Structures are given as structure tokens and as C-alpha cells.
Amino acid sequence: MGIRYDWQEAEIRAIYDTPMLELIYQAASIHREFHDSRKIQVCKLVSIKTGACPEDCSYCAQSSRYKTEVKPQSLLDKQTVINIAKQAKESGVSRVCMGAAWREVRDNSQFEQVLEMVKEVTALDLEVCCTLGMLNQSQAKRLEDAGLYAYNHNLDTSQDYYSTIITTRTYGDRLNTINNVRQTNVTVCSGGILGLGESVDDRVSMLCTLSNLQPHPESVPINILSQVEGTPLENQPDVPIWEVIRMIATARIIMPKSDVRLSAGRSRLSQIEQAMCFMAGANSIFSSDDGHMLTVTTPCPGYDSDQEMLNLLGLSMRESKANQGQRLKVKG
Ligand code: SAM
Ligand code: SF4
């Protein structure tokens, strides 16, 4: 099966509605055509600037609009980030994701410091991903020159539902930043969140938008809402695991070469639930030493428990592609 960029919502919905075990089987088969199914990429998220974000993303612990337990923290110094990256690498991490709770990048000394962090962590033979908010083309180019491997900018949900979740920017703003990144050889990481109150149609619509981007995002995070106290979505019900598996399997089938990342919310899943996500084509996870990811209120499992689970499942950690000269551009 080739890679398509013209998926229609009706086709994607039909895939999504496939009887569960048949859907998992189809996704698992396609996964094996494009990936080594025994390899899982382990990533580490470093919040390099935490909290006090002016945006109003209704799920986010870092928004200044909501009273959450997050304590704002200014930009970390470069050496601290390098030390965290070195420790993560020793635990098998091959991708370090640096997140800054900014609306957008500004051409100032803080961006210069981030560029230095990108350079030095890349030099450790780690894939570096940044998620810094909105970017213009020249900023994307400067990140490319610094050796950045990927830029994360999630669509989060459908265009129709987006304004229910976020009002301080538009879907078009998101697509514009993704397009700016696409003018460089930096790969794109873009996916969404389940559990925002969206409909299945919204999930399908988001997958349709992502799978009509050419090339596909090289990395597609599937987040499960972690309900954060103090945010508008704090009382949202948990997403049933079978809906997570349907989303992963459908993403795998329509974007076969992309990495599908089982991201936020994984700490709530049992080993067998995670195993089913891997069977459905998820091939990346976030791990950590301090039990925290996204922000200090959104936990993720630790390296040791993850290593134990991967061993149990006969899986191993994927090596970094940072300096193999190959940008995993998903070409047709
Ligand atoms: N500031 C970045 C931006 O808005 O592009 C995002 C930083 S955050 C580390 C990366 C992603 O994590 C967000 O785009 C969102 O999809 C996801 N995320 C954030 N808070 C979450 C939560 N409480 N539950 C699930 N996913 C969450
Ligand atoms: Fe800010 Fe990003 Fe959180 Fe939105 S998701 S509030 S932009 S840190």
C-alpha cells in the first residue's frame, strides 16, 4: 500500500468504525510494512519555560488564565537542559522535546539561548524536537540551522471544534506554523488530544486534515486528556481505552510511515492496554525520571517501569536518527 494525501473523511470514518480486532490486525499489518515493530522510540519532554502562558487552551496546566498547581518557571539555563538530556540518553531516550509555554517565538535573547540548547543537545546524538508556539519562516530557518530535528505543533482537534477549546488563536494559525516549518528540513510533529468533549466526527476530521498534509507529519502524537485541576476541562470523563486504540490504529493506517506517539495520559494505562496500543501501531512513548511530563501536573511513567514493560513485550528502544543525515521526510 502506498502513502496517500487525499484521504476523505468518509473513508477515514469507515476505517475508524472497522470491527475492533480486524482494525487492530489491519493496522498491525501496515505497521510492519513500514516500521520495525520491535522498536519503540522513547522520548523525554523537558519543560524549558513553564507556566504563565497567555493562551487559553482549556486543557492546559500552563495557561495563565487558569488557577492550576503549576508554578511558573523562567527559561532554564543551557547547562541544566544539557544535563537532563545526557541523563535521558543514558536511560535510552533518543528524542528530547523542549517545550516552552509561549504563544509564539520572539526574536530575542531567549530564542538565542534555545538555539544554543538545540545545537548542544543535537551534538549528543539526540533528536531534538521543540514546541515553542507559533513560528515565522525565518525563525524556522534558524532552528533548522541549529540542527533541530522536529518541531511539534499539534492541531489538537477538528477545525470545527477548535474554537470550543482555544480562542486565543485559530486553526489557520496552527497550519501556518506547520507550513513555515515545512519550508525547512525540520520534520513536523503534529497530532491531537482525545477527551476534549469532541465527537468521533471531530477526531476523523482532525485525522483527515493531518493525512492531507503533504508530506504527512513525520510524527503524530495521540494525547489522552489528563484532566488538570483548575482548567475548564478538569471534570471531563476519562477516554475509554478502545477509543484510544481506534484512533491510533486509524492514524497508523492512513499515515503509515509516520511515527504514532502514545503521549499524554499514558500513565493511566495498564501494560496490557499499552501493549494493544503498540499492536495498533503506536511506536513511540514519552518517559521520564521524575514521573512528570508535559507540565508538573501531567504525569508520565518512569524509565524503569517502561524498560520493564518493553522487555516483557519483546520491544526495544529505537536509536536516534539525529546524525544519520536522514530526515524521515515522508515522501510518496
Ligand atoms: N505550548 C505548545 C503549543 O501550544 O504548541 C504545546 C506544549 S505541550 C508540552 C504539547 C502538547 O501537549 C499540547 O499541544 C497538547 O496537545 C498536549 N497537552 C497539553 N496539556 C495536556 C493535557 N492536560 N492533557 C493531554 N494533552 C495535553
Ligand atoms: Fe500555552 Fe501551549 Fe499550554 Fe496552550 S498548550 S496554554 S499554547 S503552553
Image: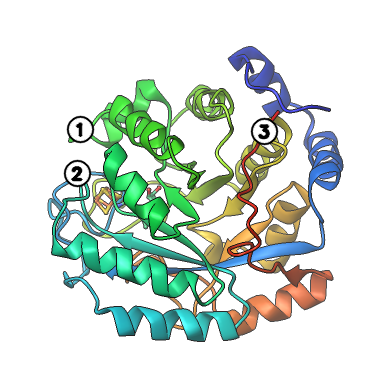
Cβ(mark 2) to ligand 2 < 8 Å? yes
Q: Is residue 301 above or below residue 29?
A: below
Mark 2–mark 1 CB contact (< 8 Å): yes
Q: Mark 2 = which residue?
A: 56
Q: In this view, does 315 lie to the left or right of 108?
A: right
Q: Is residue 182 left or right of residue 99?
A: right
Q: Earlier in the sequence, mark 2 or mark 1?
A: 2
Q: Is residue 109 above or below residue 252?
A: below
Q: Which mark is residue 167?
A: 1
Q: In this view, does 244 lie above or below 74?
A: above
Q: At 56% across and 80% down in the image, what residue appears? A: 89
Rate crowding at label 2 as few (under 14), some (14 to 19) or many (20 or more) other CA atoms within 10 Å.
Answer: many
Q: Where is residue 83 in the image (x, y as percent from the top left)?
A: 40, 86
Q: Distance between the residues labelled 2 and 1?
A: 7 Å
Q: In this view, does 41 lie above or below 183?
A: below
Mark 2: amino acid: Asp
Q: At 80% across and 44% down in the image, what residue appears? A: 34
Q: Is residue 249 left or right of residue 267?
A: right
Q: Where is residue 65 in the image (x, y as percent from the top left)?
A: 12, 51
Rate crowding at label 1 as few (under 14), some (14 to 19) or many (20 or more) other CA atoms within 10 Å.
Answer: few
Which quarter of the image is occupied by the C terminus? Answer: top right
Q: Which mark is residue 324?
A: none
Q: Mark 3 = which residue?
A: 331
Q: How far apart are marks 1 and 3 (CA)?
A: 34 Å
Mark 1: amino acid: Thr
